Image (cartoon, rainbow, N blue to C red):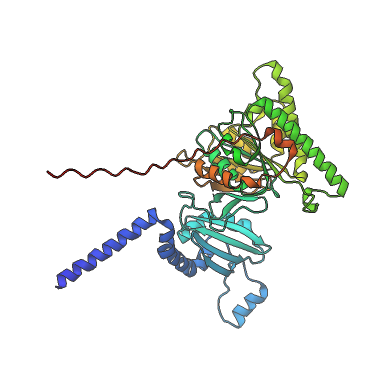
Amino acid sequence: MGDLSLWMEGAGVLAGAGGIGYAKFRAPRLYWATVGLPATIGRFTFTYRSTMDVCGLTVQPSGLRAFMSRRIARSEVQPIPPKIRRVRGTSTGLRVTLRLPAGMEPADLSAASERLRHAWGVHAVHVIPTKPGYVELRMTGYDVLRRVRMPKNAAPHDLVVPVALWDDGTAYMRNYREIPHALTLGANYSGKSMYQRSLIKGLAQLPVALVGVDCKRGVEQSRYAPRLSALATNPDDAATLIDVLVAEMEDRFDLLAKHGASDIWELPAKLRPAAVVVLIDEIAELFLIASKKDEDRRERIVTGLIRLAQLSRAVGIYLEICGQRFGSELGKGATMLRAQLTGRVVHRVNDKQTAEMGLADVAPESVPVACTIPADRPGQAVAADASGGWGRIRTPLVSVEETVAICRQFAHLIPGLPALEPFRPAVRPVAPVMVVPPKPTAAPAIP
């Protein structure tokens, strides 16, 4: 009987170890919540002071504190690490709020983030300044970009759309009020279309006008026609549509001047025109020309886009430009337009020059990271903006059917803009699904 119980205990231990190992790779959130988080909190608590000391993240105490230690406490004067103000566990990692001592800055912790990651056994450590004198260490217990799961509280609102997931476990929000125009670059099968699909899914749920420019005969954007206010599927229609958008911009500036407002958000709600987001699928198709007779059309398009990029933020017209490359080889006006696009998202690219086109002028240190995105990680990208901040993101898997269903569900949110009515795409009716009930089979005759 004793041998049997011993065997059962051993089998239980092996089954538990196997379950933990299975959860670590197949259910990382479950493993982190049950095993990883308690172990990391214990390791962080018992090794915090020594880790900060060996990483050079301590400062000498003030004269008064040194005097108190020597004369009153009769102890050796110890260097001071940042004070722990708050420790909070999350479903993806650990958040620690630190109060920096005098003489230390957030860059000191950022430079030592790789050493802190190995010391505490976590996947990554991100240093986020929250307010003067305080930083937040965002530790991730596992690779959150391997299988993307968006936070449950991430929902579109007020021109803010959750599009992807940062590598610290928070949602990457596309905020058009803060970053009005953006550029997305990426090679084939890099996840660029998935990023745009996720963006359309979020924008479709807001009362904004979506304008599509897809010169590949609309193969990408025509399926979202139920929610589009306008769609151009060839360069000629795109040139006309951009002219209409420029005229709409000028009319809105007249409205602002009439009411003494600096942008549309200062207008009363009943007078405020709807925001417009222009989604350009492949920017190169608007720049390239096949013959000399197309030069005039190209000049119209480029001039109109540059004017929109320079002026349209105040009137609520925003540009979302995608492409595989966007450099000076496209011709006159390409670099000038690119300089007006504040937000940058670069997926996997075919060469270093393409990554430099998108990131070198805003976050040069992120160019090598964009060049090392693996091919088996579609949707992973480097996101940056003109402030110099950057990080890794990955778009969740969003199916075409799901996005089309969202577009049909929120088709009633299309705002009334008479200038865009001639470009409104035709909506294909949904064919009803015929459900044929199965016919009962006859029972075999019994001889």
- Image-quadrant location for residue 425: top right
Residue 191's x, y, as percent? 52, 39
Q: Quadrant of the N terminus?
A: bottom left
Residue at (64, 46) in percent of width and height? 412
Residue at (65, 47) in percent of width and height? 413
* Residue placed furthest toward the top: 292
Q: Is residue 240 above or below residue 173?
A: above
Q: Nearer the viewer, residue 160 or 225?
A: 225
* Residue placed furthest toward the left: 447
Residue 270's x, y, as percent? 78, 52
Say left or right for 2 vs 178.
Answer: left
Q: Is residue 354 above or below residue 142?
A: above
- Image-quadrant location for residue 368: top right
Q: Nearer the viewer, residue 359 or 309?
A: 309
Residue 442's x, y, as percent? 24, 43
Q: Nearer the viewer, residue 304 or 234?
A: 234
Q: Quadrant of the C terminus?
A: top left
